[in-house]
Amino acid sequence: MSDDPLSPKQQGQIATLAGFIAPLIGILLMVILALVVDVVVGIIVGAVAVIVLVPLTQRILKRRAGS
C-alpha cells in the first residue's frame, strides 16, 4: 500500500460501496435485535403464563374432584 491520496474515482467507488453495505449491516442488526427481543419476551410471557395458570388449573381440578 502506498500513501498516495485516493483519486476522486476511487473515493467515489468507496463511498458507493459504503453506501450499499451500511444499510445491509443496519438491516442485519435490526433483524438480530428483533429476534433477541422476541425470544426474551416469549420467555417472560411463558414464565408468567406458567406461574398464573398452574395454580389456577390446580384450583379448578380440585373443585371438580370435590363436587
Image (cartoon, helix red, strand yellow):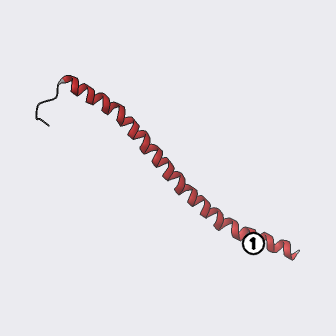
Where is mark 1, residue-wise?
58
The tally of labels here is: 1
Question: For the residue marked with disc 1, what is the amino acid?
Answer: Gln
Q: Nearer the viewer, residue 33 or 67?
A: 33
Q: Label 1: how many residues lie within 10 Å, few (<14), some (14-19) or many (20+)? A: few
Q: Residue at x 79, y 69 (%)?
A: 60
Residue 50: percent from the left, percent from the top?
Answer: 65, 65
Residue at the extreme top of the image, as rendered: 9
Residue at the extreme front of the image, as rendered: 1
Whether residue 63 sits left or right of residue 17 in the image: it is right
Whether residue 58 sits left or right of residue 12 in the image: it is right
Q: Nearer the viewer, residue 29 or 47?
A: 29
Residue 1: percent from the left, percent from the top?
Answer: 14, 37
Q: Quadrant of residue 23?
A: top left
Residue 39: percent from the left, percent from the top?
Answer: 53, 55
Q: Nearer the viewer, residue 28 or 1?
A: 1
Quadrant (top left/top right/bottom left/bottom right) for the C terminus: bottom right
Q: Nearer the viewer, residue 19 or 64?
A: 19
At mark 1, the secondary structure is: helix
Q: Quadrant of residue 20?
A: top left
Residue at the extreme bottom of the image, as rendered: 66
Residue at the extreme right of the image, as rendered: 67
Q: Is residue 7 above or below residue 59?
A: above
Q: Residue at x 22, y 26 (%)?
A: 10
Residue 8: percent from the left, percent from the top?
Answer: 19, 23
Q: Residue at x 51, y 49 (%)?
A: 35
Q: Quadrant of residue 41?
A: bottom right
